Image (cartoon, helix red, strand yellow):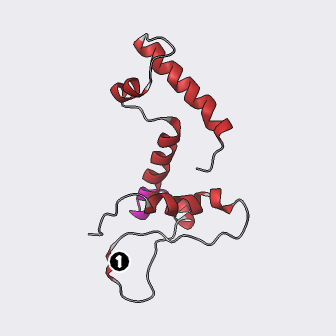
Amino acid sequence: MGLPACTTKPLQIIQNAAAHLIFNQPKRTHVTPLFRSLHWLPVAARIKFKVLSLAHRVVNSTAPAYLKSFIQVYSPSRPLRSASERRLAVPAPHRRHQGKLFSSVIPRWNSAVPLIPAE
């Protein structure tokens, strides 16, 4: 989520080293083809994927109930065509670090994903 590079970079270095070790490749070999053949995502992309999949489970009511309080589904105040889309409400930031919270990051990341109409 709002993790600094000093947190994710060591994890990425370990993941890169693991890919090189698995394929017995030199240290300077590009890891992207190795990640593709292993079906791995880089650390930052994996974090984003896990958080968005958790948000998807919350919206579809398959996640634990306590997580539902962190995510609010957007409901327009009047009838709109976009009412059939599953959008998440973006809370207004009240504090300096609130932009890094689960409840604030999910709607911003979710808006970058193509929308799937509600059934």
Indicate whether residue 109 is drawn in magenta.
Answer: no
**In x, y percent, where is residue 77?**
45, 87
Q: Of residues 55 and 107, which is closer to you in this image? A: 107
Indicate left or right for 2 with 18 as reference. right
Q: Residue at x 32, y 75 (%)?
A: 84
**In x, y percent, where is residue 42?**
48, 35
Q: Which residue is mark 1?
A: 82
**In x, y percent, where is residue 44?**
53, 41
Question: In the picture shown, does residue 24 fall above or below 16?
Answer: above
Tell me which segment is drawn in magenta. 56-64
In what element is the residue under mark 1? Answer: helix
Q: Amino acid at mark 1?
A: Ser
Q: Quadrant of residue 62?
A: bottom left
Residue 58 is at least partly visible in this image: no
Q: Which residue is most to the right?
A: 96
Question: In the picture shown, does residue 94 fall above or below 52?
Answer: below
Q: Quadrant of residue 69?
A: bottom right
Question: In the picture shown, does residue 19 fall above or below 113?
Answer: above
Q: Quadrant of the C terminus?
A: bottom left
Indicate left or right for 54 with 97 as reference. left
Indicate whether residue 59 is drawn in magenta.
Answer: yes
Question: In the picture shown, does residue 12 fall above or below 90?
Answer: above
Residue 55 is at least partly visible in this image: yes
Q: Residue at x 45, y 56 (%)?
A: 63
Q: Residue at x 47, y 68 (%)?
A: 88
Indicate left or right for 9 with 115 as reference. right
Q: Residue at x 36, y 79 (%)?
A: 83
Q: Which residue is most to the left?
A: 119
Q: How many marks?
A: 1
**In x, y percent, where is residue 108?**
51, 61
Q: How many neighbours does mark 1 have within 10 angstroms: few (below 14), some (14-19), or many (20 or more)?
A: few
